[in-house]
Amino acid sequence: MIRGERVNLRAIERTDAGHLYRWLNDPEVMRFWGQPEATVSLAEIQRRIEEWLEREAELGRPAAFLIEDLDGNPVGLLVTSRERLPHRSLELSLLIGERERWGQGLGTDVLETFLDVCFAQWGFHRVWLRSEAYNERAHRLYRKCGFTQEAVLREAAYVDGQFHDVLIFARLATDGEPETPAENRVDEE
C-alpha cells in the first residue's frame, strides 16, 4: 500500500470489480475519462482486473491501484500503462469515481504521492498522461502537480458526437517540486 495524506493507493483486487463496474458505467465520470458512451460489462471489468494482476506479477509491483480515502472507502482508480523501461517512462490514468468527492484534493494527493514513488523508488524519469481539451479541471490538477503540457493531438477523441483535441502532459524527475500558485499559498503568521 502506498500512503498519502488524504488517500491510500493499494493494488487492485478481484473483489474491486463492483466499484469499477459502477464508476466505469457512470456517464459523467466516464466523460471526464474520455469515454462517455462506454458501457462496460462486469465480465469485461473482471478481464481487465486479471490483465492488471498478470502485469503486476510480471512487473513485481501493481499495474493498477484502487484509491481509498483514509477510512478505507474506495473513491477511484489509477492505472499505469505504456511503460517503456529502457526510457524509464510511464503513462498513467487517474479516475476519481465518486463524484461527491470531486474537488476535495484527492486527485492532488494521488498524483503527488504516486509521483514520489515513481521517481524516488521505482526510478522512472518521465510520467505522462493525456486528457481531452475540455477537461479543464484535470488540466489545473496536472499543472498544480508540476506537469507541463507537451503536445496537442488535434481532434484525437470523439466524445459527445464531436471531435476534441487531446492534450499530453508530462512531469520529469528532474523538474523538481512544483511551485504553489499564489491562489493556493497559505500565508504563515
Image (tube, rainbow, N blue to C red):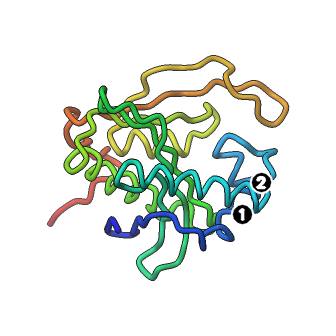
Going 31% across and 26% down the picture, which residue do you hit? 87
Residue located beneath label 2 in the image: 40
Tell me the kind of residue under disc 2: Val
- Give the quadrant of the N terminus: bottom left
Confirm or deny contact between disc 1 and disc 2 (CB under 8 A). yes
Residue 187 x, y percent position in the rendering: 22, 59
Q: Secondary structure at mark 2?
A: loop
- Near-viewer residue (93 or 132): 93
Q: Is residue 86 above or below residue 57?
A: above
In the image, which disc is placed on residue 21?
A: 1
Going 27% across and 52% down the picture, which residue do you hit? 117
Going 48% across and 20% down the picture, which residue do you hit? 151
- Give the quadrant of the C terminus: bottom left
* Few, some or many residues within 10 Å of mark 1 (<14, 14–19, 20+): some
Q: Secondary structure at mark 1?
A: helix
Going 23% across and 33% down the picture, which residue do you hit? 175
